[in-house]
């Protein structure tokens, strides 16, 4: 039989989102792949140019719907650097608290989807069950379960409600033994290993060449984690290890994500203890009044009538659950950012699909793409 | 290749346990299912009802309530028309531009009272409007059910939002403190013509027009044609909505720090 192209997507259980993986097959053998993205493009970068600095944060939650806090953090750091604002320390800890819970929630979501891809149904339910606890926590202090809109340029919206830290500790205590349970369900099974070992191998040098980051590069044995390499926020004060594996395959990515969740629990315990003993303001005091504050629109330049504000540019790089996300904000002195540019880690990760997919079989596609953890919202923006 | 199989390093468990453990779990779940409902018939019963909440919480062994809607949930807005001052701040702050200020009954005919009308087809529930509300009359409640057969019913008029206020739902307790270093409304005196537009449209009535002395015209010099009054802003009452700046015909009001 001659070779043929097959569309896996945009509506396919494998894709976890709206994108298309074109596969050239020779029988069962994958000869070539061609990822097609762009079905979910909403023009977030362009819309940002017409929104106040704080209003852009509502768009960041829609960038990646399973890791909204990571993107809010990314944008707020860049905007604060562009506007020359320093957030108070308690706000930084609240951000790390949100970030790390988000990392666990995102990895649990990945775990639930990934194990379902390889045919295990009950771990899916366990993953979603435990993720729900984190969403409940989020709701208790942000007021929403997925679109938080909690960070502000210069701090966060509000402080924690009373009794939050006790509940957070309960959730952490609940989660800690669960990771071993997940491992038992997957790693304890020979079927899992037969399905996933030596699959989708992408070596460290290929990762670097294609800009692949996050758990994929760490599963190849390269110690690259922005929280350690370029510490942002308060990660310098926190004690944790970088999760590593050396097999560079699907099982390696599984191991890295599981270890990352354990490390996140370790970080969260320190953060929760710190928050208990250090009350303080959660938003910077020296904020310019026009920053996201509503006012009646005046003329062409609005609030800037007869005033002069400093210009600047801000760049930030954040270790998102999927990889390294980067943002660039240009402040030309207006109340809107002049230009906002994002770098999505998943875009690079799935762009390298040809490197880790050619040579395997059709039935290997769901586990390989599942291990990449695709979030199309941030790929297309 | 590397061997990621960590199970090989650990001693394997007794295979009997591998069978016995799931069987025990299944038996336990079966026994539980005899005493609790596994399905909640949603529109008639809901998870946040106390009886279900406690039962689910206990049965699942989870740390705290499942399906609980916290008081600071950002759901449908509630509007207290009586305390609304029509300052427009909610409409200005909306990133989705889903708030329209519409006339409500009760204002005087010359300057009708305007209150927010929210299009929930567009609303993203970000809470910027309730954060911006200086009087605390626009807040968000725990109501989350909005499905209607018609799109037009997604538009909530001020009266409908007022009914939500009177339904005594739990309301978002978060009130943001106003910053200390807020800008004030400043005046560029030579440009002012004393037209009274700012004082007329100020929602809080914090602008008063005070008389200023009419200067003596020097020989050969022409005095500007104007009313000899100037606005004075009471900073403690001002909610910083900027309405006065936007209505000023001469652009003589601006934001700045009062010396």
Image (cartoon, grey):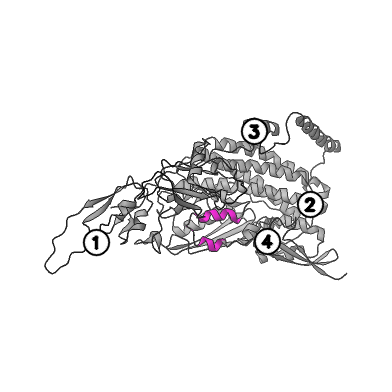
> Which of the two residues, A163 or B123, is positioned nearer the viewer here?
B123
Instruction: Determine whether the residue tagged by mark 3 lies in a helix, strand or loop.
Output: helix
* Quadrant in the picture for residue A2: bottom right
The single residue placed furthest to the right in the displayed view is A1
Chain letter of disc 1 in the image: B
Q: In the figure, is residue A221 to the left or right of B199?
A: right
- Residue A62 magenta: yes
Span highlighted in magenta in the image: A44-63
- Residue B22 magenta: no
Q: CA distance from mark 2 to mark 3?
A: 34 Å
Callout 1 crowding tier (Cα within 10 Å): few <14, some 14–19, many ≥20: few
Q: Give the main secondary structure of the magenta stretch.
A: helix
Q: CA distance from mark 4 to mark 1?
A: 62 Å
Task: State the mark number for residue A118.
Answer: 2
Location of mark 3 (residue): B53
- The residue drawn where x is 26% and y is 62% is B191
Marks 2 and 3 share the same chain: no
Location of mark 4 (residue): A349
Marks 2 and 1 share the same chain: no
> Which of the two residues, A84 or A136, is positioned nearer the viewer here?
A136
Q: CA distance from mark 3 to mark 4?
A: 41 Å
Mark in the foreground, 2 or 1: 1
User: In the rendered image, is residue A309 in sight?
Assistant: no
Q: Earlier in the sequence, mark 3 or mark 1?
A: 3
């Amino acid at each position: 039989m001659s070779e043929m192209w097959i569309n896996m997507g945009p509506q396919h259980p494998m894709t976890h989102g709206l994108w298309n993986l074109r596969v050239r097959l020779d029988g069962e053998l994958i000869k070539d792949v061609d990822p097609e993205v762009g079905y979910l493009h909403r023009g977030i970068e362009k819309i940002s140019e017409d929104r106040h600095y704080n209003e852009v944060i509502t768009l960041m939650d829609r960038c990646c719907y399973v890791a909204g806090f990571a993107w809010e953090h990314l944008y707020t750091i860049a905007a604060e650097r562009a506007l020359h604002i320093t957030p108070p320390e308690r706000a930084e800890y609240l951000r790390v608290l949100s970030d790390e819970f988000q990392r666990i929630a995102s990895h649990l979501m990945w775990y639930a989807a990934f194990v379902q891809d390889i045919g295990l149904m009950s771990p899916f339910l366990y993953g979603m069950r435990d993720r729900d606890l984190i969403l409940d926590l989020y709701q208790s202090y942000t007021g929403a379960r997925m679109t938080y809109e909690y960070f502000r340029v210069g701090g966060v919206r509000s402080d924690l409600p009373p009794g939050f830290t006790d509940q957070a500790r309960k959730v952490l205590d609940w989660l800690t033994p669960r990771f071993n349970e997940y491992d038992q369900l997957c790693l304890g099974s020979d079927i899992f290993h037969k399905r996933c070992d030596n699959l989708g191998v992408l070596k460290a040098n290929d990762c670097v060449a294609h800009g692949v980051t996050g758990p994929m590069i760490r599963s190849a044995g390269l110690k690259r984690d922005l929280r350690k390499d370029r510490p942002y926020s308060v990660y310098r004060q926190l004690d944790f290890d970088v999760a590593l594996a050396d097999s560079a395959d699907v099982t390696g990515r599984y191991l890295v994500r599981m270890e990352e969740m354990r490390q996140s629990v370790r970080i969260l315990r320190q953060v929760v203890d710190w928050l208990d003993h250090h009350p303080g303001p959660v938003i910077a005091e020296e904020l310019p009044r026009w920053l996201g504050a509503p006012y009646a629109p005046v003329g062409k330049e609005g609030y800037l009538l007869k005033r002069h504000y400093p210009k600047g540019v801000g760049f930030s790089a954040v270790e998102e659950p999927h990889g390294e996300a980067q943002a660039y904000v240009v402040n030309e002195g207006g109340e809107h950012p002049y230009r906002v540019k994002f770098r999505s880690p998943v875009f690079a990760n799935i762009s390298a699909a040809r490197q880790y997919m050619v040579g395997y079989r059709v039935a290997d596609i769901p586990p390989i793409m599942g291990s990449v953890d695709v979030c199309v919202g941030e790929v297309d923006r | 290749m590397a061997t990621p199989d960590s199970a090989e390093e650990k001693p394997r468990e007794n295979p009997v346990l591998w069978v016995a453990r799931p069987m025990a779990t299944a038996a336990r779940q079966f026994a539980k299912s005899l005493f609790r409902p596994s399905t909640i018939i949603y529109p008639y019963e809901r998870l946040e009802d106390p009886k279900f909440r406690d039962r689910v919480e206990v049965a699942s062994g989870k740390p705290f309530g499942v399906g609980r809607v916290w008081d600071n949930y950002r759901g449908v807005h509630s509007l207290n028309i009586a305390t609304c001052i029509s300052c427009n701040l909610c409409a200005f702050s909306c990133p989705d531009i889903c708030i329209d200020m519409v006339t409500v009954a009760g204002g005087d005919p010359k300057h009708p009272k305007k209150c927010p009308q929210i299009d929930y087809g567009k609303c993203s529930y970000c809470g910027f409007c309730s954060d911006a509300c200086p009087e605390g009359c626009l807040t968000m409640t725990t109501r989350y059910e909005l499905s209607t057969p018609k799109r037009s019913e997604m538009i909530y008029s001020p009266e409908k939002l007022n009914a939500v206020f009177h339904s005594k739902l739990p309301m978002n307790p978060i009130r943001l403190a106003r910053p200390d270093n807020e800008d004030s409304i400043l005046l560029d005196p030579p440009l002012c013509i004393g037209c009274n537009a700012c004082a007329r449209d100020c929602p809080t009535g914090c602008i008063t027009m005070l008389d200023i002395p009419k200067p003596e015209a020097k020989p050969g010099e022409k005095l500007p044609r104007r009313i000899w009054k100037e606005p004075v802003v009471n900073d403690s009452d001002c909610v910083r909505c900027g309405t006065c700046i936007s209505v000023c015909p001469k652009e003589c009001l601006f934001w700045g720090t009062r010396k």
